[in-house]
Amino acid sequence: MKAITITQPGGPEVLQIADRPMPAYTATEVLIKVMAAGINRPDVAQRKGNYPPPAGAPQDIPGLEIAGIVTEVGTDVTRWVVGDKVCALVIGGGYAEYCTAPEGQCLPVPESLSFAEAASLPETFFTVWSNVFDRGQLKPGETLLVHGGSSGIGVTAIQMAAALGSTVYVTAGSDEKCKFCEDLGAGKAINYKHGNFSEAITTLTGNKGVDVILDMIGGDYTTPNIKSLANDGRLVFINTMKGKNVEIDLAEVMRKRIYITGSTLRPRDVAFKSAIAQNLEKHIWPFLASGKIKPVIYKIFPAAKAAEAHRLMESSEHMGKIVLSFE
Ligand SMILES: NC(=O)c1ccc[n+]([C@@H]2O[C@H](COP(=O)([O-])OP(=O)(O)OC[C@H]3O[C@@H](n4cnc5c(N)ncnc54)[C@H](OP(=O)(O)O)[C@@H]3O)[C@@H](O)[C@H]2O)c1
């Protein structure tokens, strides 16, 4: 099969097409003919050599989410049969013509969606469910602040939290991105280049603060994040793009009874990811079927242009997801 490989750590140009053996599937896995693969920021970190894949993952083929057609099933697979259209969260190896996935990490492609649209879902949907609703315990009627509102994670968090009854505030780096987030369902988008987001949150929430913050920024956002939280608020980290070492006011944490947590999805085991898949199918897939939640694709590239796709992601010009097509 053809695969997009990381020939050495480096810039987008290190992504090159290569011939690779077909991946072997286990008794509890399916083999998928990949029609499309989503691109995520962690793929960029992996390409640069800053995010080594876990043991057992393909070491030089990136790609954490795919959609396609099941071509083989392991002997213990019960749910899927050859010919099923699925999208799947995978541990790596998604930028390839074929990829394996544990059966529990596959979800049906919603009827109205293309393969490219379905491929854009798993990584951010699993991450947002796990961090906003499981760890962050966001409840209907509560408020959520999402940094990077126009990112792949952001567009997912806005739509999922709004669909489940929360008010969502976001930050983003341009007025165009802010409008895009508000059109998608954010109650208010704050252009962080025009001032202090925590002052805006104080005003928007009438001094109460928000119940949950989903943060991929870290660094100097941490003090204003704590300032922006309500009593019993939850601060959930999924990355630290502006730095992992920070000084915080612990008295403020105690005074507001704040919970600080975070997680990384990729190293978690199949049982953990399969449990998230079940929750997504039950609580979120009906919104995809009804059109209340939509995939948000900024651009689809042919797989051979993976380097260009990575360049676009690193420019941060995009709003929503970038996808590779293998069709
Ligand atoms: N923990 C996990 O399990 C997990 C899983 C998936 C993703 N993630 C993380 O979630 C984040 C979003 O992923 P994605 O695939 O959705 O990425 P993405 O679409 O590329 O979005 C990243 C956004 O972050 C903002 N940004 C970039 N560099 C920044 C910086 N130095 N300071 C502040 N803002 C910056 C940009 O928006 P503006 O132009 O508005 O600044 C950009 O659109 C990434 O950091 C990724 O590593 C974590």
Image: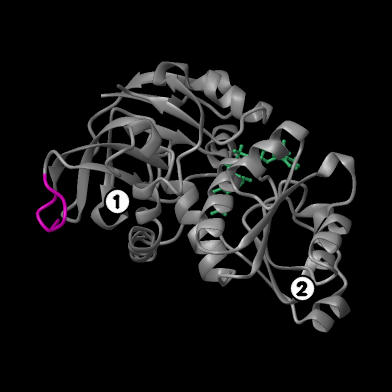
Can you say which quadrant of the picture contains the N terminus?
top left
User: As displayed, is residue 268 above or below residue 9?
Assistant: below
Please tell me in which quarter of the rendered image ligand 1 is found: top right
Mark 1 vs ligand 1: CB under 8 Å?
A: no
Residue 10 — which label? none
**What residue do we see at 30% from left, 44% from top?**
110
Magenta stretch?
74-81
Residue 186 lies left or right of residue 278; in this view the side is right
Magenta span dominant secondary structure: loop
Can you say which quadrant of the picture contains the C terminus?
top left
**What residue do we see at 45% from left, 50% from top?**
54
How crowded pointer 2 is (Cα within 10 Å; few <14, some 14-19, many 20+) is rated as: many
- Residue 217 in view in this figure: yes
Residue position marked by numbered label 2 in the rendering = 230
How crowded pointer 1 is (Cα within 10 Å; few <14, some 14-19, many 20+) is rated as: many
Q: SS of the residue at dot 2?
A: strand
User: As displayed, is residue 105 above or below residue 137?
Assistant: above
Amino acid found under the numbered disc labelled 1 = Leu
**What residue do we see at 29% from left, 32% from top?**
34
Q: Earlier in the sequence, mark 1 or mark 2?
A: 1
User: As displayed, is residue 111 above or below residue 218?
Assistant: above
Q: Residue 266, percent across and down?
A: 47, 53
Residue position marked by numbered label 1 in the rendering = 107
Disc 1 and disc 2: Cα gap in Å? Answer: 36 Å
Label tally? 2
Amino acid found under the numbered disc labelled 2 = Ala
**What residue do we see at 58% from left, 43% from top?**
184
- Pick the front one: 121 or 99: 121
User: Answer yes or no: do the residues labelled 1 and 2 have beta carbons within 8 Å?
Assistant: no
Q: SS of the residue at dot 1?
A: strand
Q: Of tags 1 and 2, which is closer to the observer?
A: 2
Q: Is residue 176 magenta?
A: no
